[in-house]
Amino acid sequence: MPRRSGLYGVISNQGSLLRWRRGKCHAIMSNIYAWVCLYDFGRLLVMRKFIAFSSLLLLMPVIQAQDSEPLEIVITGGLVPVSRDNVGTSVTVIDSEQIERQGYEFVADILQDVPGLNLARNGGPGTLSEIRLRGAEADQTLILIDGIEANDPSQSSGFDFAHLLADSVERIEILRGAQSALWGSDAIGGVINIITKSGNGLVDPEYSVSAEYGSHSTKNAAVGTRGDTGLFDYAFSVQRFDTDGISSADDTVFNYTLPDSSSLVTGGNSEDDAYENTTAHFKFGFDPTANLRIDGVVRYTSFESDFDNFTTIPIDSTDDRSDGDQQYYLLQGRYAQLGGALNHSLKFFRNESDTDFFSSFGKTDSKGEKNHYGYQLDYGWNSGSSEQGVSLVLETEEDKLNSTFSGNREIENDSIVGEYRFNNSDFAAAANIRYDDNDFFDSKTTWRVAGSWKFAPNLRLHSSYGAGIKNPTLVELFGFTPDFTGNESLSPERSSGGDIGVEYLSDDGRQFFDITYFHRDIEDLITGSGDTAINIDGESSSTGVEIVYQNDLTDNFGFNTSYTYNDTEDDQGNQLVRRPEHQFSAGIDYSMLEQALKLAVDIRHIKDRVDTAFNEDFSTSLVELDNYTVVDLAARYRINESLSLRARVDNLFDEEYQEVLGYNTPERAYFVGLSGEF
């Protein structure tokens, strides 16, 4: 049957994903990241510092797939993966089936239908692409790629989705709401966990190839292989994307009215901005014994991106471009004792970026680096019909920035994190506490509690509440350009908030409904002011409701809808920029010809947004952006067991709109491609 498991996904027994027998989970519940999770290799904290390890370990017990009812596991639900039914936080899971049905080249496009999530892009492919969750700023959501924290110190600790291609992605988890007590300073708004394809558990090796061509001379091709020898599993892929692009500065003329009743006109640009991206991804696992596992990831992206100049509005430029690369490395180990009840994890990862910017003013560069070293101890036990567990994490992170204007800067943060977990057949709860010792800011303690209660056979109450911090970024502290000098006196942003919701799942799993209320307050919000950054006195807030409904009416027809209302205010009562007050999405799936032909329609409506308009003296005012509705259409026809033909039309009705003031968005575009799996 068609399944939009982005709303309520189910893990299968393919690849590294598992099926779990509900009655067999208790003793091993704290260990199930055995197969799926990414944990820990690195340094141990002694007093306030970590001692470096140059060792190997990793591990987890081998757990056999079961043929009983599938139980969905959320890897980022806590310090250990937990079943979705036990997660108190609002979560959306996008699985490989949904990724395939939409056919998008970029992860950012896949995420557009997630409740409470808004995407803002400065033009076409390769331009700055930022995501905001529940009204949080773009640098307040943590992005994980196979367990690697991908937030970039050279991008003001945010993550630019412009260069994240989708071919190697298997699954995405989106946790909304305060996650700082679990994941640290970057997770006030939530966590987006991107999990790539794995060879773990495959009986025979698999090979894949795909090629696509479309509007604006867009070419997209990928090859990959994955498999499992029993002792060693692997997955390797390479993807190449190339397009002539569209103008980053809008070609369509838009007329806006400013608060003083004057007019602002944007658009009228025509010079296309090209983009190229080559991404290689290698993921492996090694099981030297039944209790020991070692995992690793190497990911490399190289890109060239044209962009347009900015005065007070974006304007055409033939000189502006950026060339860069991104590198991600992970090595992790886990060792299981006491039949899997006690687990030790070591983890090391590195995230590097190096970007050169070229313009009429010459060349500048910016390099970012994040290093993480951690140790994690997990212990789980049974008490009658309940399962309980505790975890302790000791970690250190180094953020580094080296740019033409900031010079060489570095901040180190040492952390201790604790978690307690409890669950039985109807109730689950988790509590977290985190202590951060930062070498630039005062030490801080954050916390979070979450719970889940099945109060009726098909109904579940879920809720979470927590306090978090967001440290000023290296860019905010030390500057980035001659026009932005930074402010070393900034204080961390402080947040508190939570959510509460009720969900319904029918007995046959075909219908799913969830309604969630959320609220968050932020004190000392950091914002730009002239040529620097400042803390705003008072509170900024984000309040709203998320509603999700899915219904697979037949094996061949299903639909889903989601609506988010989000009321945001700064300390002056103004709406926060680029956070729509109303956001609606709908998806329709239809299969025919014995499911050989699959059709998908996605609809998005965005209403009531504001953005920042700059005056000649660089003072600012707010301007209301136009509402818009975009419809995308995708089709996939299975020629035989190995080959599929696919086609896609983006922006079917050629809607003209802006996600960011003055910047272009793609017109109607056509794509056709062929893919094979052998």
Image: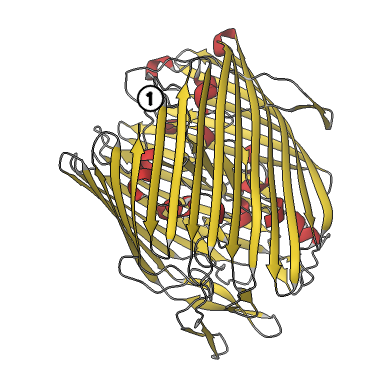
Q: In what element is the residue under mark 1?
A: loop
Question: Could you tell me residue 438's position as x and y percent?
Answer: 80, 43
Question: Could you tell me residue 337's position as x and y percent?
Answer: 61, 10
Q: Residue furthest top?
A: 338
Residue at 30 percent of width and 69 percent of height:
653
- Residue on which disc 1 sits: 13
Answer whether residue 470 is visible to the viewer in this image: no
Q: Residues within 10 Å of mark 1 (few under 14, many from 20)?
A: some
Q: Residue furthest left?
A: 593
Quadrant into which the N terminus falls: top left
Q: Residue furthest bottom?
A: 262
Q: Quadrant of residue 182?
A: top right
Horizontal arrangement in the rendering, residue 398 relative to residue 40 (left or right): right
Question: Could you tell me residue 415's position as x and y percent?
Answer: 74, 36
Q: How is the image coloured?
A: secondary structure
Answer whether residue 559 is visible to the viewer in this image: yes
**Picture layout, residue 409 above or below residue 412:** below
Residue at 47 percent of width and 78 percent of height:
251
Q: Nearer the viewer, residue 396 or 657?
A: 657
Question: Could you tell me residue 630's position as x and y percent?
Answer: 35, 65
- Amino acid carrying label 1: it is Asn
Quadrant into which the C terminus falls: top left
Q: Nearer the viewer, residue 30 or 66?
A: 66
**Picture layout, residue 532 above or below residue 367:** below
Residue at 34 percent of width and 50 percent of height:
673
Number of callouts: 1
Q: Quadrant of residue 671?
A: bottom left
Horizontal arrangement in the rendering, residue 440 relative to residue 469 (left or right): right
